[in-house]
Image (cartoon, grey):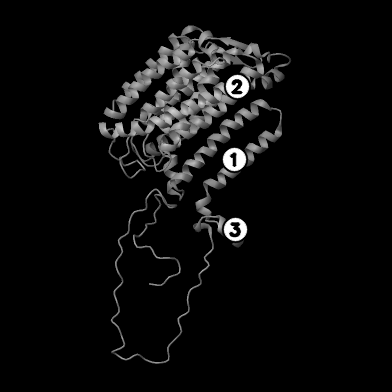
């Protein structure tokens, strides 16, 4: 564990330190696209953050290769080299897209080529575990097609969810942390060396995301762009393929006893197939809703709009940061809930805890609709919008005399205030209410 933590820290440090110079390089080269109608940021922001993440990946692999306990991963397996080869290709395509906006079909072809390169070097799915049956071996073309499909879907899912500052990096980091716990348990719990590459990949992936997040949190100073989103999607897919394709389920000795017992016991083997869905579930749901929404309104399914899940969170009243945290919450609930259930699948407390946390998540989603008010004793610990108004309206005494004409001052006409559209930083985000430049304190007259 110490070597993994060292690798993670080195990856995070290199990514963090290189992001600043990469930002200056992106500004100098003009990698700052104009703001589109569906974007939520208000100023042009440089991309190419994936450059720093790529060098963080290289630093993590280099450090791991020189550590005594992790050097065996490079000696006994070709998977780290396969990952690096695919990462180089997908990173180059992403950098070109961040700078020149290449066609979507070219990007799709590049993703398939990168996946094919990894397959050629041995990073592929060889078998699929089936409860009660055992290991179902795949033919060469079946394994290749399944591997390419998993890589392409995961890459595009991460790219699709990259719509708010810090959203994609945080969600992938959460999924990688859950994946790390699972693969580490398979390696040291069941003493299966084939799970070591996936454990290393997820540790490096966490370092890449953690090193980039300080620069990418709202308000973001730099975006990862396609060079970053496709890269971390590839690493996440490679970790899933490594565990699923290289770890023999029969080595876990779980297919014993009745079919019912084997079904319950085989659950940990299916986690590599389920964990990538923790990052895909929210984007796929958003994609399906977008297709239905656009088709229903008579538009093309590929027409861009502002109806995605993160846009809706902003519209109902969540701030930018709170919308991202809510998405983090659901990703962590799904990812760690799946891992916890795989460890104690017979425990009902795990299911009850997941249900309770889901209810909490629903309350958080609808929080702006309720506009709750904190009790008096807790008002010092909550934001001002949740406090009760303490200032009472002032009572103006009625005067008993009539002012003379000389005492009367001409009544000033109310000054016209130009409404300013609500931005993305306040609690109202993109809501219908507008903010005025000359704000007055609550309770003052005039």
User: Could you tell me how far apart the alpha carbons at marks 2 and 3 are, in whole angstroms?
Assistant: 43 Å
Question: Is residue 13 at all visible to an observer of this figure?
Answer: yes
205 vs 343, left or right, is left
Q: Nearer the viewer, residue 141 or 173?
A: 173
Q: Residue furthest right?
A: 257
Q: Residue at x 32, y 91 (%)?
A: 404
Residue 378's disc number: 3
- Give how far across and how far down residue 422 sits, in percent: 37, 53
Are the residues tagged 2 and 1 within 8 Å (C-beta)? no
Say whether disc 3 or disc 1 marks the residue closer to the N-terminus. Answer: 1
Q: Residue at x 37, y 15 (%)?
A: 113
Numbered disc 2: secondary structure: helix
Residue 184's disc number: 2
Label 2 CA crowd tier, 10 Å (few <14, some 14–19, many 20+) = many
Q: Nearer the viewer, residue 102 or 366?
A: 102
Quarter of the image where one finds residue 131: top right
Position of the N terminus by quadrant: top right
């Amino acid at each position: 564990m110490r070597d993994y933590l060292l690798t993670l820290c080195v990856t995070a440090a290199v990514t963090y330190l290189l992001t600043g110079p990469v930002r200056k390089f992106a500004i100098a080269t003009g990698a700052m696209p104009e703001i589109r109608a569906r974007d939520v940021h208000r100023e042009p922001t440089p991309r190419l953050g994936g450059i720093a993440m790529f060098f963080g990946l290289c630093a993590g692999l280099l450090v791991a290769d020189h550590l005594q306990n992790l050097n065996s991963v490079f000696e006994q397996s070709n998977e780290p080299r396969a990952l690096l080869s695919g990462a180089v290709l997908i990173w180059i395509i992403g950098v070109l897209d961040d700078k020149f906006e290449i066609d979507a079909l070219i990007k799709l072809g590049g993703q398939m080529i990168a996946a094919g390169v990894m397959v050629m070097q041995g990073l592929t799915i060889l078998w699929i575990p089936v409860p009660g049956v055992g290991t179902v071996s795949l033919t060469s073309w079946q394994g290749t097609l399944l591997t390419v499909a998993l890589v392409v879907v995961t890459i595009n899912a991460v790219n699709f969810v990259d719509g708010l500052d810090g959203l994609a990096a945080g969600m992938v980091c959460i999924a990688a942390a859950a994946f790390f716990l699972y693969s580490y348990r398979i390696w040291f719990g069941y003493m299966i060396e084939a799970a070591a590459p996936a454990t290393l990949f997820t540790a490096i992936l966490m370092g890449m995301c953690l090193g980039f997040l300080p620069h990418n949190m709202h308000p973001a100073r730099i975006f990862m762009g396609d060079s970053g989103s496709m890269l971390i999607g590839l690493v996440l897919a490679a970790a899933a393929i490594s565990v699923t394709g290289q770890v023999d389920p029969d080595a876990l000795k779980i297919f014993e006893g009745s079919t019912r017992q084997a079904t319950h016991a085989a659950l940990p083997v299916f986690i590599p197939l389920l964990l990538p869905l923790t990052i895909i579930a929210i984007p796929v749901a958003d994609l399906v809703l977008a297709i239905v929404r656009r088709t229903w309104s008579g538009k093309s399914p590929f027409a861009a709009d502002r109806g995605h899940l993160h846009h809706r969170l902003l519209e109902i009243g969540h701030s930018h940061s709170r919308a991202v945290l809510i998405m983090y919450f659901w990703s962590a609930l799904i990812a760690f809930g799946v891992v916890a259930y795989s460890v104690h699948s017979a425990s009902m407390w795990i299911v009850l805890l997941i249900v309770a946390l889901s209810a909490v998540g629903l309350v958080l989603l609808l929080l702006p609709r309720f506009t709750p008010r904190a009790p008096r004793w807790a008002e010092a610990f909550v934001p001002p919008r949740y406090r009760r108004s303490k200032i009472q309206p002032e009572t103006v005494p009625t005067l008993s005399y009539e002012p003379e004409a000389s005492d009367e001052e001409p009544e000033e006409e109310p000054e016209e205030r130009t409404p300013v559209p609500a931005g993305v930083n306040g609690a109202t985000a993109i809501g219908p209410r507008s903010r005025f430049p000359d704000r007055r304190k609550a309770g003052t007259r005039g």
